[in-house]
């Protein structure tokens, strides 16, 4: 299968609320914590060890992109199902180029982002730090945001070892009931991964456009050798998905695939596999048989059905002879 890989996390500490809901704030649809009045501290810690054993997180996210593009199901409910199982993506860390962006008055954003709405390679995009935090804390007052930034900077400055900073910042942000993420940002990202995976599957040596995958920038990812694999230290769920996806994409033999029948993403045990389940394989075989049968049959103007394995002229002659004998 894929290379042996061992993921590492900063203290493996990423909190999430037990349940989320969708709310519209200032005309923008957000995924927000659903707060119980009787139990305020309804959050838990994400256990990343479960994700290392299988690729369900990555597969579910890609399929979120597929299903939302097809618009056959309620995209809001699909999004909530994913977030309630895995938590928010931690986009607040993903978009800035500068690692400790709260120390600056302006945030330099990656070229590919969903905030400015500008095209890739257009220009360098910057935002005032207060405005940037407003994207993720839209209901917080400016004074609350300033206090949050000050707490962030104190955490950065007081630690003697850098590896303890991100876990504390994550706890500061993700345990905050006012930390929201825009639904459109999450959906767009899921759709991007689906489009990339779909584009990587080209047959007959057709041109593959790699421009989309180049947009998956993971800033400040740290790696170190460990045994016969590598450890990747990340800061958010978004970075986990990015790195997992890219490690599959760069392999010569493709194990991350789209099912030839249902179109959903899956990880194959064999690079030659084309279907995610035996059911899909059997159904596709039935469709293929019916297609071959229908393409081999032709109905004439007289209502007579003939096998379409002979020339049209010969077919017409047979029809004429049949009509004479009626």
Image: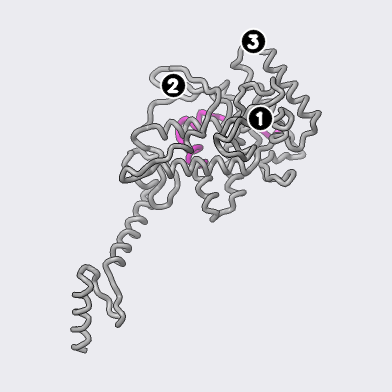
- Tag 3's secondary structure? loop
Q: Is residue 210 above or below residue 146?
A: below
Image quadrant assignment for residue 143: top right
Give percent across and percent down for residue 311.
Answer: 20, 70
Q: Find the magenta span and give its range.
A: 41-61
Q: Earlier in the sequence, mark 3 or mark 1?
A: 1
Name the residue located 42 percent from the left edge and 25 percent from the top edge: 5
Q: Earlier in the sequence, mark 1 or mark 2?
A: 1
Which label sits in the foreground, 1 or 2? 1
Residue at the far top in the pictured view: 160
Label 2 and label 3: CA atoms lie apart by: 26 Å
Name the residue located 55 percent from the left edge and 25 percent from the top edge: 219
In the picture of the structure, the residue carrying the numbered disc 1 is 126
Of 231 and 212, the residue lying toward us = 212
Q: Is residue 194 left or right of residue 285?
A: right
Within 10 Å of disc 2 (Cα), the crowding (few <14, some 14-19, many 20+) is: some
Give percent across and percent down for residue 76.
Answer: 62, 49
Image quadrant assignment for residue 10: top right
Label 3 and label 1: CA atoms lie apart by: 30 Å
On whether residue 14 falls in the magenta region, the answer is: no
Which label sits in the foreground, 3 or 1? 1
Q: Earlier in the sequence, mark 2 or mark 3?
A: 3
Q: Are marks 3 and 1 in contact (CB under 8 Å)?
A: no
In the picture of the structure, the residue carrying the numbered disc 2 is 230
Q: Are marks 2 and 3 in contact (CB under 8 Å)?
A: no
Q: Is residue 180 left or right of residue 243?
A: right
Give percent across and percent down for residue 298.
Answer: 29, 72
Give percent across and percent down for residue 78.
Answer: 57, 47
Of 166 and 306, the residue lying toward us = 306
In the picture of the structure, the residue carrying the numbered disc 3 is 160
């Amino acid at each position: 299968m894929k290379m042996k890989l061992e993921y590492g996390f900063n203290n493996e500490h990423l909190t999430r609320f037990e349940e989320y809901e969708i709310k519209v704030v200032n005309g923008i649809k957000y995924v927000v914590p659903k707060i119980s009045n009787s139990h305020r501290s309804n959050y838990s810690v994400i256990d990343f060890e479960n994700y290392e054993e299988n690729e369900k997180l990555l597969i579910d996210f890609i399929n979120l992109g597929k299903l939302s593009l097809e618009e056959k199901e309620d995209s809001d409910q699909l999004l909530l199902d994913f977030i309630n199982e895995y938590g928010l993506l931690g986009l607040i860390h993903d978009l800035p180029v500068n690692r400790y962006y709260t120390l600056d008055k302006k945030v330099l954003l990656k070229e590919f982002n969903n905030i400015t709405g500008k095209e890739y390679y257009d220009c360098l995009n910057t935002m005032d730090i207060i405005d940037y935090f407003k994207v993720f804390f839209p209901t917080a007052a400016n004074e609350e945001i300033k206090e949050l930034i000050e707490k962030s900077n104190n955490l950065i400055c007081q630690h003697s070892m850098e590896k303890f900073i991100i876990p504390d910042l994550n706890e500061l942000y993700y345990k905050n009931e006012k930390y929201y993420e825009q639904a459109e940002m999450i959906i767009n990202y899921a759709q991007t991964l689906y489009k990339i995976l779909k584009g990587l599957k080209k047959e007959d040596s057709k041109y593959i456009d790699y421009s989309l995958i180049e947009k998956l920038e993971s800033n400040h990812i740290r790696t170190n050798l460990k045994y016969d694999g590598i450890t990747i230290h990340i800061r958010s769920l978004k970075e986990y998905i990015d790195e997992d996806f890219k490690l599959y994409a760069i392999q010569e033999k493709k194990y991350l695939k789209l099912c030839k029948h249902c179109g959903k993403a899956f990880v194959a045990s064999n690079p030659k596999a084309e279907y995610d389940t035996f059911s899909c394989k059997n159904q596709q075989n039935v469709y293929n048989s019916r297609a071959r049968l229908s393409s081999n049959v032709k109905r004439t103007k007289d209502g007579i059905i003939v096998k379409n394995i002979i020339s049209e002229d010969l077919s017409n002659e047979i029809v004429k002879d049949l009509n004479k004998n009626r």
